[in-house]
Image (cartoon, rainbow, N blue to C red):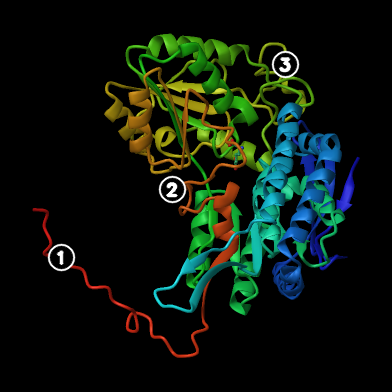
Amino acid sequence: MSRHIVSIVGGKEAAATTTYESTNPARPSEIVARVGMADAGTFADACRTAKEAQREWARVPAPVRGRVIASIGRLVEANTERLARLVTEEIGKPYAEALGEVREIVDTCDFFLGEGRRLYGQTVPSEMPDKNLFTFRNPVGVAAVVTAGNFPVAVPSWYLVPALLCGNAVVWKPAEYAAASAHAMFQLFVAAGLPDGVLNVVFADGAETFRGLELALDEGSVNKVGFTGSSEVGRKIGELTGRHLQSACLELGGKNPMVIMPDADLDLAVEGALFSGFGTAGQRCTSLGTVIVHESVHDAFVERFARAVGEARIGDPTREVLAGPLLDQKFAERYEEYLTWIQPHHTVVSGNTGKITKDNPRGDFDGEGGLYYHPVVVDGVKPGDRLFMEETFGPIVGVTTFGTLDEAIELANLPGYGLSSSIYTTNPKNAFRFREGISAGMVSVNNSTSGAEAHLPFGGNGKSGNGSRQSGMWVLDQFTRWQAMNWDHSGRLQKAQMDVAEIVPDLDFRLP
Ligand code: UN1
């Protein structure tokens, strides 16, 4: 069923200048939605509208805003299957994973509905009598949120839910190739009773969005930018917001390492590598980049890993498969470029590479014309190789070896990303030394690099982000600003640091 959707600003449909067709990557000739694309002016208008609406929204008591978040959670839960089916149809995410993705929105609502009754500030003792000190969390104002389409609804909810709960208005620019999923989620949020203009959705391409953002920042109608996407675009957004004295919340790429110690449970490690390397067709920012395996277990690991990859089911994402197609043609093209980074000193241990077609089938699966790709394991990658150093969004995993844990940590940090990481070991000492040495924002022990829970801090360092953290209580620092208040009721001007009582100690006192 093909839909026609457009941006919604202030509760009204906004003008479109071009049309984009969002297609089903499993059957690219099938159009999921025709998307009216807006220009930079509409984006800036949306930010102005949001600024107007935000004033009233911030005056709604936080516990009442929390009730709205509760209703969003209920609405999403009641529409789980429909939303998950749409996600599967539009980006090819296997249905079981799509259900998990929708679950993550509900989890996020569950967490933040209670925050409406907390959103704590503090009372702090003053250094002077008859004076009281307080802290308050104030909403930042308008948040412009630009998200990727690999998690078309869960990751946006990490921004939207806390931003709204804290009393901000939002302009959301989802990925165009996931526009139908985004539009559906927008409708569910609005049905919970959000006043017009508090949440706006704008469909626009990258260039128009960037120009619109620049206009809005110049006008002072955006106070926080949230961005999930590539390190390259994240850097540009960081520069733009920096010029406006703002720090964006950036969730960028990863080259996530998995270290396998000689004492690891190898079968468990293989299972973890398979899921984090090839689940979601390797298209998570937390997907496995390089397996760094101890030289003594390298051969055994590679043999078992290659076998597991060979046996994994790739195919129709409405069925029980490990992975479906790539997200969209743009991603397929980029992925084909990563395949050209395979060099003569590498060994592909997983069989065929490239697009699954009649001439290049995977067993009896010929790809049915979809954007399906062979999962690829490349042994022998090393520092300096592009495959080792750069993110390769898609189903390709490198393997390299190490001698000591210190070497493994150095290899794991070398590409300069820092989102997720994992170590397989049965020795707690190794786990804690790895945790201390790894530059990633997230560390898994005996678990895959992907699949973070929704109430832990999520975010990266280095090329993976600017240190901002989403999720749980940590994200509150993105969407609120601390305000310090002092109230002197002494009836006189008491000067800090000067009019402070002094108690004189006898510092020469010694025990007999
Ligand atoms: C992403 O790909 O941008 O931890 C986020 C995970 C998911 C989120 C991935 N919950 O793998």
Cβ at disc 2 under 8 Å from ligand 1: no
Q: Is residue 98 left or right of residue 158?
A: right
Q: Is residue 335 above or below residue 483?
A: above
Where residue 410 sits, quadrant-wise, is top left
Q: Which residue is mark 3?
A: 365
Locate residue 247, reporting x and y percent. Answer: 50, 64
Q: Is residue 346 left or right of residue 144?
A: left
Residue 390 is marked as none
Q: CA distance from mark 2 to mark 3?
A: 40 Å
Q: Residues within 10 Å of mark 2 (few under 14, many from 20)?
A: many
Q: Is residue 165 above or below residue 341?
A: below
Instruction: Determine whether the residue tagged by mark 1 lies in a helix, strand or loop.
Output: loop
Q: Is residue 97 left or right of residue 481?
A: right
Look at the image and tell me whether residue 345 can be seen. Answer: no
Query: What amino acid is at disc 1?
Result: Leu
- Asked if marks 1 and 2 touch (Cβ < 8 Å), the reply is no
Q: CA distance from mark 1 to mark 3?
A: 83 Å
Q: Which residue is mark 1?
A: 507
Residue that extends furthest to the left in the rendered view of this protein: 512
Instruction: Determine whether the residue tagged by mark 3 lies in a helix, strand or loop.
Output: loop
Residue at 38% x, 43% y is 416
Query: What amino acid is at disc 3?
Result: Phe
Q: Residues within 10 Å of mark 1 (few under 14, many from 20)?
A: few
Q: Which residue is mark 2?
A: 461
Residue at 64% x, 31% y is 280
Which quarter of the image is occupied by the N terminus? top right
Q: Is residue 503 left or right of residue 470?
A: left
Q: Earlier in the sequence, mark 1 or mark 3?
A: 3
